């Protein structure tokens, strides 16, 4: 049994070598993300963790709905702008499944 585990580990390790003989590359979904115009969004939170700084933005309508205790409007987008060591790293867009994160923030 030990020799079987060794063989599986050795073969698996070989297949994952960075020379291109490993597993197929990752597959991304074909649906493209459409970012809203960032100048039309409002900054509602900044998160800092070590060298990471993240700005979170969404629409004024979403912020007003949350403050009023209503659900955010359908189609609302949340954008996160991620900086690493003060260098822009990436933009992330969250769809409807992430709306709940807006509702747990203290927006006052």
Image: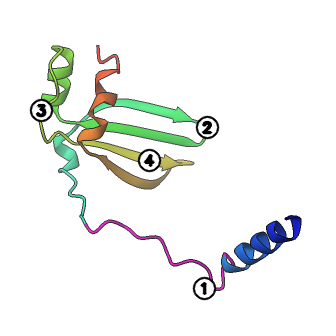
| Residue 44 falls left or right of residue 84 | left
Sequence-first disc among 1 and 3:
1
Point out residue 69 in the picture as x, y percentages from the top left corner.
18, 14
Q: Tell me if 92 is positioned left or right of 89 in this view.
A: left
Write the residue at 57% across / 77% down: 23
Structural distance between the alpha carbons of marks 4 and 1:
30 Å
The residue indicated by pointer 2 is 50
- Badge 4 crowding class, 10 Å Cα cut-off, few under 14, some 14 to 19, many 20 or more, is some
* Vertical order, 19 against 94 (above or below): below
User: Does the magenta portion include 82?
Assistant: no
The kind of secondary structure the magenta stretch mainly shows is loop
Q: Looking at the rendered structure, which numbered label has been put on residue 20?
A: 1
Evaluate if marks 2 and 3 touch, with contact meaning CB atoms under 8 Å apart: no
| Mark number displayed over residue 39 | none
Q: Are marks 4 and 3 in contact (CB under 8 Å)?
A: no
Q: Quadrant of the C terminus?
A: top left
Q: Indicate the position of residue 71 as horizontal and vertical percent values.
A: 16, 24
Whole-angstrom CA distance, mark 2 to mark 3, is 33 Å
Q: Quadrant of residue 50?
A: top right
Q: Earlier in the sequence, mark 4 or mark 1?
A: 1
| Residue 49: quarter of image | top right
**Which residue matches tag 4?**
82
Range drawn in magenta: 16-30
- In the rendering, at what x and y percent does residue 56 appear? 34, 37
Marks 1 and 3, how far apart in space? Answer: 46 Å
Q: Earlier in the sequence, mark 2 or mark 3?
A: 2
- What residue does disc 3 label? 73
Of circles 4 and 1, the one toward us is: 1
């Amino acid at each position: 049994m030990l020799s079987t585990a060794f063989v599986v580990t050795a073969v698996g390790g070989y297949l994952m070598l960075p020379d291109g003989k490993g597993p197929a590359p990752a597959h991304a979904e074909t649906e493209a993300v459409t970012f809203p115009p960032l100048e039309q969004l409002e900054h509602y939170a900044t998160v800092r963790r070590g060298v990471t700084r993240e700005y979170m933005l969404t629409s004024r309508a979403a912020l007003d709905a949350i403050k009023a205790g209503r659900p955010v409007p359908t189609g609302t987008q949340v954008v996160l702008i991620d900086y690493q060591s003060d260098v822009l790293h990436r933009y992330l867009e969250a769809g409807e499944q992430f709306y709940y994160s807006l509702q747990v923030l203290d927006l006052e």
